[in-house]
Image (cartoon, rainbow, N blue to C red):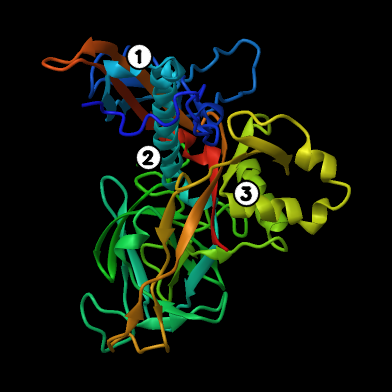
Amino acid sequence: MANLTNFGEQFASKVLEKTYASAVSPAITNSDYEGEIKKPGDRVNILSFLNDIRLSDYVVGTDMASETIVDAEDQLIVEKRKYYNFALDRLEEVFTYGGDIPDNLLENQSKVLEREIDAYVLAKAGDTAVQNWVGTNLVVVGSGQTMASITTTATGGTITVNANNGSYESQIGAVENPVDGLVYFAGFEAADIGKGVRLRSTATFVSPWYKITAVTSSTVATITEWDGAASGSDFEEGYTLRGTFGGDGRYFPKYGDGNASLLTMSSLGWEFNAAIATAVSAASIYDQTTLLSEKLNDAEVSDVDRHLTVPPAILTQLRQCAELQPTGIAEIYSGMVLNGRVMRFGGFDVHQAAGVRVSTRVGKSTAATAAAPSADAVLTAGSIGYQILANHSGMITFAEKWSESRVVDAENQFSKKYQGLFLYGALVPAYRRKYGAVLFGNF
């Protein structure tokens, strides 16, 4: 009648404990929210200030202008609910060696829950600002005709990519990518949602990166700003997208020259950001990590409390990295393991996320040969890559609560039931998307 199917030898003194990797979520998230969690579906509030305080010149005898601070309140929904409910026959109490059975199983449950939470939190890597991704870009070079166009809407805009004359609606071909020389599908796919896209003219300027929020067809996609904003002091007046006069603020002037608008330009090509998972190896990981750091530096994110969360294979590559041999040995192995922290590298506290904790996504579809835009392209699903997150702890807000935890007697059985209900949720506030950077890679 016992639920424990095999008590083993009675002289055994302890139940063999399982061990798991430490949770990384406590180290890479924050709990800066207002509100109380009482039940599933509750919302807590996160306050953000969207504009910096302006400094103005003071003139004696002249009244100072007052500035309005733009504040936004994001709501974190406690969307996840996990429970445990297991029964132990009281017969186990007869055997003194089994006295730690409930404690052992509860500890096991706690570790399993940690693994679930880590995977949930690390999936938020997909909410990182689209300009902060590191991977292999897909570039579609414009021709003498209009290849791509953009229109604005109340919430952002729409990009339509037009093939050469003779093209068909919702159909586009495959192109050779000048970045890596391989052939990829040139249009929009469902896997592109959440990624960055921009229009480009190598002779003139490029647009900023816009976030793909929906794919209508292979030639039409809905876009928004990286933070979802549609107005603000850094928007051209009357436009709901930044940089409609071109300029990414790095390789070209931030607002272009004001003489030509992307809304009317012809001969534009387009580019997908981190469309393809890049190869990660011991030879490349140092450079790739510095690129992640550069993304955060460009966004003026504090260089304190930065974290890099990697699967075990990439941790091995970090330790084998030639740039840290032998002078970097102390940096690699110094410090205790805490919240999965196993080393410090390139200004990041590095955390190992074992198992399936680090999230993945699929890259652009490939083709055997370039196909004319008016022809059908035979496609193969793109390769899957890890979304390796580098972030400041301010990026992800995490809320949790043990709603119930109890031990009850089972009805009609000589056993006890151990029950618990855990509520949690996480959110990347719009403005804090820039607090993260993602290496989209495989190995």
Q: Using the rendered view, name the quadrant where residue 21 is placed.
A: top right
Distance from disc 3 to disc 2, alpha carbons, whole Å, reads 24 Å
Please name the residue that numbered disc 3 is placed on.
292
Distance from disc 1 to disc 2, alpha carbons, whole Å, reads 65 Å
Mark 2 element type: loop
Q: Quadrant of the C terminus?
A: bottom right
State which tag comes first along the sequence, 3 or 1.
1
Q: Nearer the viewer, mark 3 or mark 2?
A: 3
Amino acid type, label 1 = Val
Amino acid type, label 3 = Leu
State which tag comes first along the sequence, 3 or 2.
2
Q: Nearer the viewer, mark 3 or mark 1?
A: 1
Q: Count how many numbered circles sit on residues in the image.
A: 3
Q: Using the rendered view, name the quadrant where residue 74 is placed.
A: top left
Mark 1 element type: helix
Considering only vertical position in the picture, is 370 above or below 11? below
Please name the residue that numbered disc 2 is placed on.
229
Q: Is residue 70 visible?
A: no
